[in-house]
C-alpha cells in the first residue's frame, strides 16, 4: 500500500507544480525541480532513490519515442549534419575534455573512469531545452537542431559510459570508443527500422482505436528490451522507430485512432516529464547523506566540471558551425547563421535525469569515488537547469535570435488548404451521382468555409472575422443544446446512454472549434 500512496503523492505534486508553473508563467520542469529540492528536506518524508533501470527502461523510451513521433522527419534530415555534430561529436569531445579535467583534479582515479563520468554529464536533456526553445520562439531550424541533438545524444553518452567503464584498468582511446559508438548505433538503426515496419504493419490492419493505442504504447518498450538483449543502442532504435512511424502515421491510422492516441500520449508525456524533474530534486537529501568526499574537493570538482561543460560547448559550436562552410556544397545548401545563433545553441545545454541515472550505473571501487561522481552529476543538472534554463530566454531576446513564423505558416496553410479544397470539390463532383442536391450543396459550403477560414488568418485581427463569429455563436448554441439534454436526462425522458452519445457529438464539435481558435 505504501508504494501506491507514494506514487499518488508524487503524481499529485507534479500536477500541482505544473498548474503553478502555468499560473506564474514559468517552465514546469524548473518549478518541479525547485519543489523537489525543497521537499527533499521536509521532515517525515521518505528518502527517494532513483533506480537507473527505471529511468533508462521505464521513463526515457516513451519520452524519446513520443518526441520522435512529433518530429518533422523532412526538417530532421535537412539538419542531420549539425545534429550529428552535436549528438555524436560534441558528446565525445565533452566526455574526453571533462575526463582529463577530472583526472587532473583526482589523479588517483583511473582515466577510463573519468572519461566515463565525462560521458555521464555530456548529453543535454531531451525535454527542457526544446520546451524553452519553442516557448521563446527560437528560429525553427534552431529548434529542430536542439530536438535532434536531444533525441540522439543519450545514445552516444550511454555507449561511451559502458565502454569506458568496462575499460577500467586498460587503455582507452578516442577511436576505440568512436568505433563502438558507430557499430552500436548502426545496429540500433536497423533494429529501429525493423520494429517500425512491424508496428506499421500492425497499425495498418487494426481498426479498433484502443488496440492502436496499446500497440503504440508497447512499441518503445519492446524496442528497448530487444535492443538491450542485442547489445545495441536502444536509444537510437527507439528514435528511428518513432521518426519512421511519425512520418507514416497519417497513412496508418484512422482519424479516431489519431485523436485518441494523441490524447493518450499527451497525458503520459505530461506525467512522466513532471515525475522526472521532481525525482531529480528529491535526490538531494539522499545524495548529501551518502557523500563521503570532503567539502573542498566536492566544491572544486563540481565548479570545474560545470565550467568545463559550458566552455566545451562553446569551443565546439563555433568551429562546427563555420568551418564546415568552407566546403562549397555545404555553403550552398545551408545559410550562414549570425554568431548569435551558435551562442544560443551553446547556452541551451541543460542536463536532465538521464545524467543522474547514468551516474548511478558507474562502477564503485576504492579508486572510483562513485558517491562524489553521483553528487557532481546531480549538481550539474541543478546548475544547468536553474542557470541556463532561467537565462536562455533573456539571452535569446538580447541577441535577437527569435523568429515569428505565424504569418509565414498562415500563408503556407492557406495556400495548401486552397489546393486541398479544390481537390475535395473535384472528388465531391465525381462521387455525387445519386446523392441529394441539398447534401451536395452543404458539402460544397463546408469546403468553401474551410478554405475561407485559412485565408482569414492572414487578415487583420483588429475586428472579429466571420469564422471567429461563427465559433463564438456556435459555442453558445452548443451550451444551450447541452442544457436541454441534461434536463431531459434528469427528468427521465432519455437514458444515460442517449445523453452520452449526444454529449460526445457536441464535445467533438466544440473541440474542433477550439482547435480552430488555437
Image: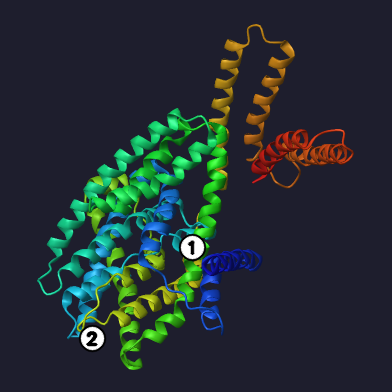
Left or right: 512, with 493 as reference point: left
Q: Nearer the viewer, residue 322 or 499?
A: 499
**On the image, numbered disc 1 is attached to which residue?**
400
Q: Residue furthest front?
A: 1
Q: 44 or 312, which is in the foreground?
A: 44
Q: Which residue matches tag 2? A: 105
Q: Secondary structure at mark 2?
A: helix
* Mark 2 Cα-neighbour bin, 10 Å: few <14, some 14–19, many ≥20: some
Q: Is residue 515 left or right of residue 79?
A: right
Question: Residue 41: horizontal and vertical position, in percent?
Answer: 52, 83
Q: How many marks?
A: 2
- Residue 231 image-quadrant placement: bottom left
Foreground of the two, 109 or 338: 109
Tell me the mark number nearer the camera, choosing from 1 and 2.
2
Asked which secondary structure carries label 1, the reply is loop
Q: Horizontal placement of 254 versus 205: left or right? A: right
How far across and how far down the image is residue 161, in percent? Answer: 24, 66
Percent of width and height locating residue 215 = 44, 40
Residue sitting at 28 percent across and 79 percent down?
Answer: 370
Left or right relative to 255: residue 157:
left
| Position above or below: 7 against 214 | below
The residue sitting at 90% across, 39% down in the picture is: 491
Residue 454 higher or lower than 57, as above or below: above
Report whether residue 71 is seen.
no
The numbered mark, 1 or 2, whose residue comes first in the sequence reads 2
- Which numbered tag is attached to residue 369? none
> Which residue lies at the image location 49% right of the left edge and 72% below the top edge?
391
Amino acid at each position: 500500500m505504501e508504494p501506491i500512496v507514494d506514487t499518488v503523492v508524487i503524481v499529485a505534486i507534479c500536477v500541482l507544480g505544473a498548474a503553478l508553473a502555468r499560473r506564474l508563467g514559468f517552465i514546469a520542469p524548473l518549478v518541479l525541480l525547485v519543489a523537489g529540492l525543497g521537499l527533499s528536506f521536509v521532515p517525515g518524508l521518505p528518502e527517494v532513490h532513483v533506480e537507473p533501470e527505471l529511468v533508462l527502461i521505464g521513463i526515457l523510451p516513451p519520452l524519446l519515442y513520443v518526441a520522435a513521433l512529433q518530429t518533422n522527419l523532412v526538417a530532421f534530415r535537412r539538419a542531420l549534419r549539425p545534429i550529428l555534430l552535436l549528438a555524436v561529436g560534441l558528446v565525445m569531445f565533452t566526455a574526453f575534455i571533462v575526463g582529463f579535467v577530472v583526472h587532473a583534479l583526482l589523479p588517483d582515479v583511473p582515466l577510463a573512469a573519468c572519461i566515463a563520468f565525462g560521458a555521464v554529464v555530456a548529453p543535454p536533456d531531451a525535454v527542457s531545452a526544446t520546451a524553452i526553445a519553442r516557448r521563446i520562439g527560437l528560429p525553427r531550424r534552431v529548434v529542430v537542431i536542439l530536438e535532434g541533438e536531444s533525441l540522439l545524444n543519450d545514445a552516444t553518452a550511454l555507449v561511451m559510459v559502458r565502454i569506458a567503464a568496462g575499460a577500467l584498468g586498460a587503455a582507452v582511446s578516442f577511436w576505440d570508443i568512436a568505433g563502438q559508438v558507430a557499430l552500436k548505433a548502426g545496429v540500433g538503426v536497423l533494429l529501429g527500422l525493423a520494429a517500425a515496419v512491424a508496428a506499421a504493419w500492425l497499425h495498418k490492419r487494426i481498426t479498433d482505436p484502443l488496440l492502436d493505442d496499446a500497440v503504440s504504447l508497447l512499441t518503445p518498450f519492446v524496442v528497448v528490451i530487444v535492443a538491450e538483449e542485442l547489445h545495441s543502442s536502444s536509444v537510437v532504435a527507439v528514435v528511428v522507430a518513432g521518426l519512421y512511424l511519425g512520418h507514416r502515421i497519417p497513412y496508418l491510422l484512422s482519424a479516431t485512432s489519431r485523436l485518441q492516441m494523441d490524447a493518450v500520449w499527451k497525458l503520459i508525456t505530461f506525467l512522466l516529464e513532471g515525475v522526472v524533474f521532481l525525482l531529480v530534486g528529491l535526490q538531494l537529501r539522499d545524495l548529501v547523506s551518502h557523500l563521503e568526499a570532503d567539502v573542498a574537493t566536492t566544491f572544486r570538482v563540481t565548479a570545474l566540471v560545470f565550467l568545463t561543460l559550458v566552455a566545451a560547448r562553446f569551443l565546439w559550436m563555433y568551429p562546427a558551425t563555420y568551418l564546415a562552410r568552407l566546403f562549397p556544397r555545404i555553403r550552398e545548401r545551408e545559410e550562414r547563421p549570425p554568431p548569435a545563433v551558435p551562442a544560443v545553441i551553446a547556452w541551451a545545454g541543460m542536463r536532465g535525469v538521464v545524467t543522474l541515472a547514468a551516474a548511478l550505473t558507474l562502477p564503485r571501487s576504492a579508486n572510483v569515488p562513485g558517491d562524489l561522481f553521483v553528487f557532481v552529476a546531480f549538481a550539474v543538472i541543478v546548475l544547468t537547469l536553474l542557470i541556463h534554463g532561467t537565462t536562455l530566454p533573456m539571452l535569446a531576446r538580447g541577441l535577437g535570435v527569435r523568429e515569428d513564423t505565424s504569418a509565414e505558416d498562415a500563408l503556407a496553410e492557406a495556400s495548401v488548404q486552397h489546393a486541398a479544397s479544390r481537390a475535395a470539390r473535384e472528388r465531391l463532383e465525381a462521387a455525387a451521382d445519386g446523392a441529394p442536391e441539398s447534401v451536395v450543396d452543404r458539402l460544397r459550403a463546408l469546403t468553401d468555409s474551410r478554405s475561407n477560414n485559412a485565408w482569414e488568418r492572414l487578415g487583420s485581427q483588429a475586428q472579429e472575422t466571420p469564422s471567429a463569429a461563427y465559433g463564438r455563436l456556435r459555442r453558445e448554441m452548443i451550451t444551450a443544446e447541452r442544457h436541454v439534454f441534461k434536463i431531459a436526462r434528469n427528468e427521465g425522458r432519455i437514458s444515460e446512454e442517449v445523453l452520452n452519445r449526444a454529449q460526445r457529438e457536441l464535445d467533438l464539435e466544440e473541440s474542433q472549434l477550439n482547435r480552430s481558435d488555437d
